[in-house]
Image (cartoon, rainbow, N blue to C red):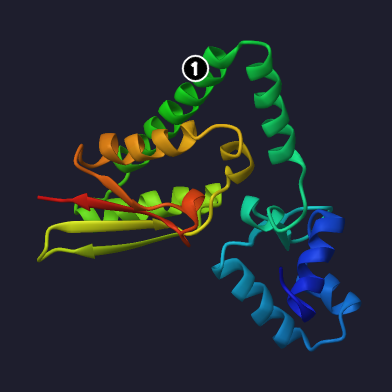
Amino acid sequence: MFTGSKKQIVDLIKRKGTLSIDEAVEEIDLAKTTLREHFLQLERDGYVERDYVRSGPGRPSLQYQLTSKGNSLYPSSESKLIRNIINYLKSKGSEQLVEDFFEDFWNQRLEEAQERIKNSSAKDLESKVKLLMQMLEEEGFMPEFDFDESEESLTVKECNCPFSEVIKETRLPCKLEEMFYKKLFNENAERTSYIAEGDYSCTYDIPTD
């Protein structure tokens, strides 16, 4: 979580819904130029996004709001609730329903990734991977990648698991995430590190030949 003036900005947006730089100047004891730089940094890092809002006659004002990544900075009980739902369904003998749900969810993710790539102007593999990185970032995976053209290999790291609470009840998402990379890139894709087993990331090595 942020500290200092950036935290003040993010907290204000969370409380108000939207925030302009002029409004931030009234609330935070910093120069406008400094606040503007903080807003730009938060935007570059994907925590806020800008929009022009019209609230009367005259020019619309520039307002900032939190992205899904920005909202994820705040405590939520959703993951714990989903974990409890899964545990409840399993206790009632509905494990197949749980499995069907996750398989359908991951199929939708695969289709979204394929559509993003298909509808883009990306032609080379690296450009396509960058589109996937954007999707994974939005989902909270904190992704990184390394593309070694000479070795014909792609390495994707997911440095955060947004399904960590769910995985305490079922490892199915882990299995489906590996299949996601096999179907999207190469059936020989392999997970070589695993957060659930104490590693710092889930790493996928993907041949690109």
Instruction: State left or right for residue 38 relative to residue 151.
Output: right
Residue 12 lies in what quarter of the image? Answer: bottom right
In front here: 183 or 126? 183
- Left or right of 123 in this view: 53: right
Q: In this orientation, which residue lies closer to the viewer: 49 or 206?
A: 206
Q: Where does the image place residue 161, in percent across and percent down from the top left?
A: 54, 50
| Residue 9 point in image, percent of width and height | 78, 71
Relative horizontal placement of residue 55, taking residue 68 as reference (left or right): right
| Residue found farthest to the right | 27
Q: Which residue is drawn at 38% across and 39% down?
A: 113
Q: Which residue is drawn at 76% across and 77% down?
A: 3
Disc 1 crowd rating (10 Å Cα; few below 14, some 14-19, many 20+) is few
Q: Where is residue 138 in the image (x, y as percent from the top left)?
A: 53, 50
The answer to whether residue 35 is above or below residue 208 is below
The residue type indicated by label 1 comes to Asp
Residue 67 relative to residue 30: left or right: left
Q: Residue at x 71, y 21 (%)?
A: 88
Residue tagged by mark 1?
Answer: 100
The answer to which image quadrant residue 147 occupies is: bottom left
Q: In which quarter of the image is residue 91?
A: top right
Vertical relation: 139 (above or below) 110: below
Residue 135, image x, y percentages? 46, 48
Towards the viewer: 100 or 94: 94
Q: Which residue lies furthest to the top in this view?
A: 93
- Secondary element type, mark 1: helix
Quarter holding the N terminus? bottom right
